[in-house]
Amino acid sequence: MGESMAKKSIIVAGVGIAVGAYLILSFFTGTGIFETKTYILFSEIPTTIDEMARTSEVIVIGKVGNMIEAEYYDDGKKRKATSSMYIDIEQELTGNYKDKRIMIKTYGDGKSVINTAVQLKEGERVLLFLSYSDSDWDGADGYVVCCTSQKFSINHNDIAYNPVFGEYKLDELINIIQEARANRIKDAAVESDYAVIGKVKNIKKVSLIKDEPPDEYTITANVTIEIDRAVPDYKDKEVTFFVWGIDDIDYCIKDDRVCLYFIKHDKHDARKQSDEVADYYLYSGVFANDGAYKIVDGKAYGKEYPEGIELNELIERVKKYKGLN
């Protein structure tokens, strides 16, 4: 499955959801509060079915098996748990997973640590949007189900229900997913001005606070890359663009690596705060790093292609959506 789908640090089962700020209520011993149960709460960035369909690594329809095991952490103040279980696969919608059974994980154990966002019951028929997590927070690596949006329950009449999105006929939901996946990278291609490929030449931190110079904590920056290739052609050999967080392109900065960036020229919010901000900025959708794709052995890995896509194929798709073919 290609670098185990490039082993992304996207921990939220590929939904285009950020568990941007999830909170585990502390387990304080001796206080009488949560002595027997801890409840996990999640803050979920709004997403759409289209977004989840485009960014998920694996999308399965199947039945939930029994819980295999639970991993626990408790330091006396805070406790967490992740549970592992199998899904017996009836249908897989991405083509990225070939087996008939997949092991997934969810936060909580359903007993002492309760996930208030999503619970998986043995025997339940579900549709799940999944991505691979190698986050230390999750324990052992695996596919994680955390949040409300990524689980649809399916009844005996083939009606799929999600508390965020409501009811869909299963066939209708499958068609929505397949159509969205057929149009992956379209938004980035259409909404950006250029797709540029190259190596980072220079990074200059930029403070967005008036009269305060950048310091060690500043993460906003102008990034200059040496262009190997651009769609459409770019007039110069270098281009500088603004990023909201240099950590968002951390992979591309390391070891002189080649990446693809979708960039846009606009009077964006950061330009309003500082004249030092570059005219171009890195395209972002739900996440700030949606516009950066790392290139490994001729394949591009990024938000809408976590499993990887041949770089030349990606470029042809960009040309198609920009009307350059």
Image (cartoon, grey):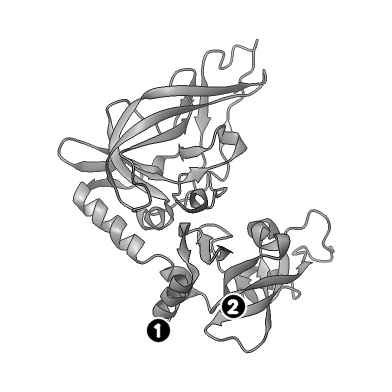
Please tell me in which quadrant of the rendered image residue 209 appears. Answer: bottom right
| Mark drawn on residue 118 | none
Residue drawn 58% across the image and 60% down it: 289
Q: Residue furthest bottom?
A: 235
Residue drawn 67% across the image and 57% down it: 250
Q: Type of residue at label 1?
A: Gly
Please tell me in which quadrant of the rendered image residue 25 appears. Answer: top right
Looking at this view, is 170 or 116 the one in front?
A: 170
Looking at this view, is 92 or 292 the one in front?
A: 92
Q: Type of residue at label 2?
A: Asp
- Per the image, label 1 sits on a secondary structure element best described as loop
Please tell me in which quadrant of the rendered image residue 152 appears. Answer: top left
Looking at this view, is 98 or 243 the one in front?
A: 98
In this image, 235 relative to 180: left or right?
right
- Per the image, label 2 sits on a secondary structure element best described as loop
Give the image location of residue 86, x and y in percent.
Answer: 37, 31
Q: Select label 2 or label 1 by which is in front.
A: 1
Q: Quadrant of the C terminus?
A: bottom left
Give the image location of residue 140, x and y in percent.
Answer: 55, 33
Q: Residue furthest left?
A: 157
Q: Which residue is mark 2?
A: 266
Give the image location of residue 287, x and y in percent.
Answer: 54, 57
Between the C-alphas of marks 2 and 1, the distance is 21 Å
In this image, 212 relative to 292: left or right?
right
Give the image location of residue 316, x and y in percent.
Answer: 43, 77
Residue 311 visible somewhere in the drawing? yes
Q: Is residue 24 above or below residue 203?
A: above
| Mark drawn on residue 323 | 1
